[in-house]
Amino acid sequence: MRVRLGLIVPAEARALFRRGLEGLDGVSVRWGVYDDEASIRATVEQVLPECDALCFAGALPLERALPVIPDDMPYVDVAPTPLDISLSFLRARALGIELTPVSIDSVPEQMVADLLAELGLGSESVAVLPFDGQASPEEIAEFHRRQQTAIGARYALTARNSVFHLLDGALGAPVVRVLPSASTITATVRELSLRAVSIRKEDLHLSAALFCAEPTTSAEATASGAAGVPAPAERIAAVLRSTTGWKDAWIDVRSDTRVLVLGHKKLMQDMTHQWRSLDVLDQLGDLVRCRVVAGFGLGESTRSCIHYATLAAERALQAGTPCAFLMTEQGVVLGPLLDTGERPTRFQFKTDDAVLERLSRHTGLGVATLTQLIELDRRLDGASISADELGTSLNLTATSGRRIVRALRQDGLVTTVGSSQPATRGRPKHLYRLRFSDYLRGDSASRHDRADIGDERTRT
């Protein structure tokens, strides 16, 4: 499987990267060569449609390009290694310069400290400016000028081409580049290529989607079977077969209300905007005049894909709104996928985590509910929530929210922090604070709670 690799490099580094690619099989290069930092983003956008992965000549071009890199595309920057920095020191020695004092920019400070210790050099005579994508070449050049006075730096090492051009011949001292070696480039590109191949193979795995129509009344269900009126599933299938993307999948009407779609995982990801939303649901709902939901399933076989798609569709039906869920064989659940494009909640419905299993046994709540609660606690970050709001956040009824709060209170996983009166009439609503973060951190309070779990339920 040949990988189309986009190489984003400055013009002067092209020959170096070409040497690093010698002998690499299975890689087809798309060169993205830029002359100045301002053109990096436009260069990436130009080569992007022809690439399976992107390799950048350093952290700076990667940072400039991040906003336009697709979420599912693997990428890497060729970061300086201790060997690369050592070679830069050797270049300085070849010029007849003592190794220290020196100023160096855009490399990890700890890496330099470790290297100096290996070489038996004192760190007090080396000034390091770590990489900062927001720092301008002028600001970095000024850092090197200051170090000539501060530590008596005899020369400067820089990993930024723009800084080299700015200081070369103007610093009053030699300027040496920190360049990746050909072996560093080879190792980095090989690792990236393997990742790209793995992702492409995974994208070819089978995935299933189950679309379900839910007639709102028995009269509508009866009318769908009347002579001359196609069943909801037939109309859903007709729309999918005429829609770009979906029409490339295998579509089968399973009943009057259910349509099964089989296709590659990559197709499903594209149609859900990387598992974030499913914009066809509202269109289908308007067409069949009832709520339409969908479930996606990922598994090792066609049977398991369909099985988890069915479970996900049933979960979507419970949500009460047009939405979709994803379930995988590994126990991951993602949802709800709504038309708004909001990032869905990720949780588990099965796990090997002993802590979650113990919590599930003690609270009587399922692993899926507990992992959603843990994610909700993280998002709330200490803020309070009512039982009704908790139920809504989990796509459950208010009654279910109150039941969950009762179960959590028994085990000290939620505490009452006050009440609110959203309306002039009616009873005030109690406000609660989730305590999963404390429990999972294992601090003194949560350890006390763990000892009490089960005992407190017995006492009550």
Image (tube, rainbow, N blue to C red):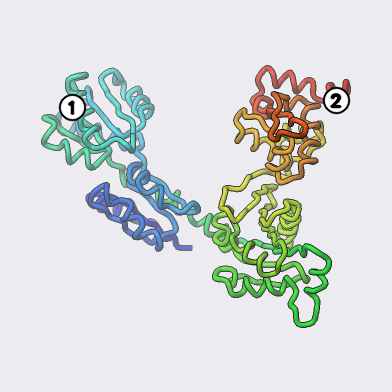
Q: Which residue is mark 1?
A: 145
The amino acid sitting under disc 2 is Arg
Q: Is residue 282 left or right of residue 112?
A: right
Mark 1 and mark 2 in contact (Cβ < 8 Å)? no
Q: Residue 36, percent across and down?
A: 24, 49
Q: Nearer the viewer, residue 180 or 222?
A: 222
Residue 122 visible from this viewpoint: yes
Residue 404 picture location, percent across and down: 78, 36
In front of the other: 319 or 83:
319
Q: In the shown orientation, is residue 96 left or right of residue 343?
A: left
Give the quadrant of residue 253. bottom right
| Earlier-in-chain disc, 2 versus 1 | 1
Residue 408: give x, y in percent of width and height: 77, 30
What amino acid type should be assigned to the residue bearing mark 1? Answer: Arg
Circle 2 SS class: helix
Mark 1, secondary structure of its residue? helix
Q: Residue at x 65, y 37 (%)?
A: 376
**What x and y, as percent, mark residue 294?**
68, 60
Residue 27 lies left or right of residue 103; in this view the side is right
Mark 1 neighbour density, 10 Å: few (under 14) some (14–19) many (20 or more): many
Mark number for residue 457? 2
